[in-house]
Image (tube, rainbow, N blue to C red):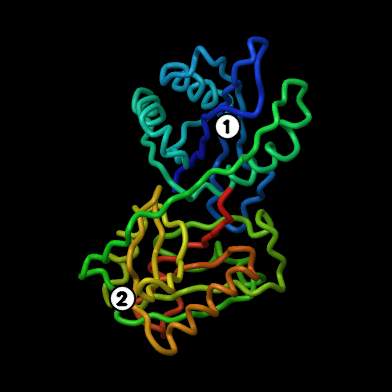
Amino acid sequence: MGVIWEIDFYSRPLVDERQKKVWELLICESPSTTAQPASGLFRYAQYCPSDKVNSLWLGEALQAAMIEAKQSPQRIRFFRRQMNNMITKACKDIGVPAAASRRSIALRQWLDERMQQFYPSQPNYQAVASLSVQMFSDPPQPLPEALIGEKWGFVSLAASEFADMSDWEIGFGEAFPLDMVGITPEMQIPGLILYSPRSVPLAAWMSGLEIVSVRYQPAPKSTLLLETGASESWILARLEGTTQQEAARFEVSKQQANGVHFIAIQANPDLEEFAGFWLLYESVDR
């Protein structure tokens, strides 16, 4: 997997000498493994004058960041849907694919840190009523019939077992350092395993979805959902009886694990390899 960048281009709680909002570009490299130290991820920040907020300025700033990083990202993620047109145009102009995605773990952690510590320390800080960024989910869609797993089950792994995840046999997937989100070795990480004889096509299809989280929706219909992309949602299973109770316990386990969980895909339970494995993080909406 090539390098992926997470970016945010938006106004900050800062004002310039004309009392206009200051805009800022933040870039953070997406972690890809549990072994990758968060301190080693590329970061870049650049303010933008309010009268220069356009795709041309953004494209030039991204190119400046590539020079500093000494490499170009394979693709770019961004989580603000209202910035879709400007960001996608800027990225298209410089030849880098971009997609709206809620899987922006490193960036959201950094942005939260700046909102709480950095911006309030600046002399041109202007307090705001709310710093929240609302995330949305579209109505759930059914999975393509050919990709539905034959069996599935909830499992859990000790966080310490992810230390050697880079040695596991995984076809498709993505991870991140667990200490980035406050996970300690003794904590249990809940997950969902899908079993399917078409495990490789299923994992390949999921690899293009920007997987965000697995979520239990108790109402209006008891459903297990796969959240992907900017707002997409897919029905993994309809639940009833004991599976509803298992799903409810899964949600509790996620909360106890600071929102960290995983989804895995195997051809059958006897294999020690995964067609797909994604470490996931469901944050509280900021």
Q: Is residue 144 left or right of residue 104?
A: left
Q: Percent from the top left, x then y, of residue 13?
A: 65, 29
Q: Amino acid at mark 2?
A: Gly
Nearer the observer, 74 or 121: 121
Structural crowding at the residue carrying mark 1, measured as other residues with C-alpha within 10 Å and reported as few (<14), some (14–19) or many (≥20): many
Q: Please state the horizontal and vertical placement of residue 76, each as a whole percent of the image.
A: 44, 38
Q: Look at 57% across and 56% down and name the residue there.
A: 283
Determine the CA span between mark 1 and mark 2.
39 Å
Q: Residues within 10 Å of mark 2 (few under 14, many from 20)?
A: many
Dot 1: element: strand
- Against 204, residue 37 (above or below) is above
Q: Is residue 272 left or right of residue 158?
A: left
Comes first in the chain, label 1 or label 2: 1
- In x, y percent, where is residue 185? 71, 69
Residue nearest the observer in this picture, 165 or 285? 285
Q: Which of the 4 image quadrants contains residue 184?
A: bottom right
Is disc 2 placed on a helix, strand or loop? loop
Question: Which of the two residues, 3 or 183, is positioned nearer the viewer here?
Answer: 183
Q: Which mark is residue 149?
A: 2
To which residue does mark 1 refer?
26
Q: Is 118 left or right of 275, judged from the image as shown?
A: right
- Which residue is at a point 42% across and 35% down the rendered structure image? 82
Residue sticking out furthest to the bottom: 242
Task: Give the amino acid at mark 1.
Answer: Leu
